[in-house]
Image (tube, grey):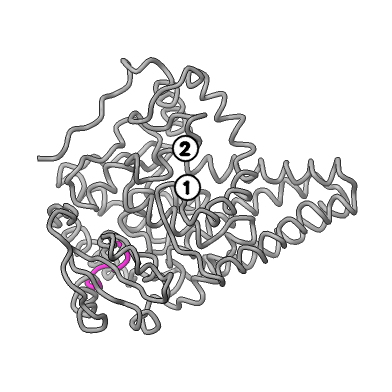
Amino acid sequence: MEEVARHDGRDGTYWIEVRGEVYDITEFVAKHPGGSILTLGAGRHATTLFESYHLGSGVGRAQRVLPRRARHVGSLRAEERQSYGDPTFVDTLRERVARHLAERGLHHKSGGWIVAVESVVLVSVFLVAWWFRATEASYLAAIVGGLMMARLGFVMHSGNHHAVSRRPWLNEAVGTTMDLIGGSSYIWKVEHQFSHHCHPNVTGLDNDAEIGFPLLRFHPALPRKPWHRIQTVGLAIGMSFGLVKWVLTDFVYLARGRATHAPFHVSSGQWAKVAVFKSLWFGMHVAVPVVLIGPLHGLLSTLVMLAIAAYYMEGIFIVNHLQRDLVPVDGAHWAEQQVMGTANWGAGKRWTNWISGGLNHQVEHHLFPSMPVHLYPVISPVVRRTCEEFGLVYRDYRGFASALADCMGYLHELGRPVSVVDPEPVAAE
């Protein structure tokens, strides 16, 4: 893997590892139907990415095409091969989901265009709200801007997961709304699609399991600090400044070439994109409001916008993984680990799916990350039934309120003495 890691794009070459076999995909990238997303696995163990992004029968086709379109470099050393587990669950689930969609005249990309249309509407309203906030010191516009910013966080999530269209350029365009609202779509892909989706709720691998540490303790494997006794209050206060940190920490990650546990190569093009969009963001939300309406209202209205966006967007995100007994066991198949490390709320309902940007169907999303979120309520009954058949707990809270209550209760429990925290799970047999 040390040799594979050297080919992460820094010298213009890309190598990926899939089920112990190493491929040079440098020439294949330009011809890849899914676009440059293939390079996200460069220099890494890419089996989970490879299998989770090829839906239904597409997995089999991709496994046959890869050796023909990419150069087979060699096989990974036995001691460095990952445990892949039994694929029976995911194979059965994919077959059932494909049949379920076909019976309804749908396919795995149906409805993705809705997110593209929504992103245009959201950007338009966001810019209008910004204008009224920056010129009229309107705090109502700041609130509306915050809501639009959170919704843009949901659509960029779909775009960067390539869940909008079969056309790579359209996915990239929607995903770039992440850059418009202050983040970096490139760093987000590394952090979220590689670090989080490949290893949900696994410390040392999933960055999200360690967000806020040492100020906050989100995982039983992390050491407890005295101040964690009041971390529920700390989270409620700290969340309001969460997006301020988000805007700034990308520079640190870019300089290090690593986002906590996820190393990455930064091209000159990525540096330029971050510089342009960060400059645009600071100009729009700091410089222009301060000049037009003064530093007090200019900065305060921006902070109100960021706080509203954070409570809406991060509030939705946090309840999906910060719950009791959501630590996957070692040795299980990647698809089973997705179910073990995630929780739903209000599954099967279209209105909860819309208000959460599809993230209330977290189990479905982790199993089918490139599927349009509008299909999650459709496939939810199939996923639930198949999980139960295979002895996997399909966690689904009745609504957001009950999910949030259990989340806060577990967070409080994690802040108490170590003796009351659930022990870590044992490895799968």
- Front residue (pair 399, 419): 419
Callouts 2 and 1 close, C-beta under 8 Å: yes
Residue 104 within the segment the image draws in magenta = no
For the point 43% across and 63% down, which residue is it? 161
Q: Which residues are magenta?
A: 52-58
Residue 300: percent from left, percent from top: 79, 41
Q: Residue furthest left?
A: 429
Residue 273 vs residue 403: left or right? Answer: right
Give the label on residue 118, or none. Answer: none
For the point 57% across and 69% down, which residue is it? 117
Residue 90 vs residue 297: left or right? Answer: left
> Image quarter for residue 84?
bottom left
Residue 201: percent from left, percent from top: 34, 41
Residue 284: percent from left, percent from top: 77, 58
Label 1, on which residue?
A: 352
Classed neighbour count for the residue bearing mark 2: other residues with Cα under 10 Å, few (<14), some (14–19), many (≥20): some
Which residue type carries mark 1? Thr
Give the label on residue 400, or none. Answer: 2
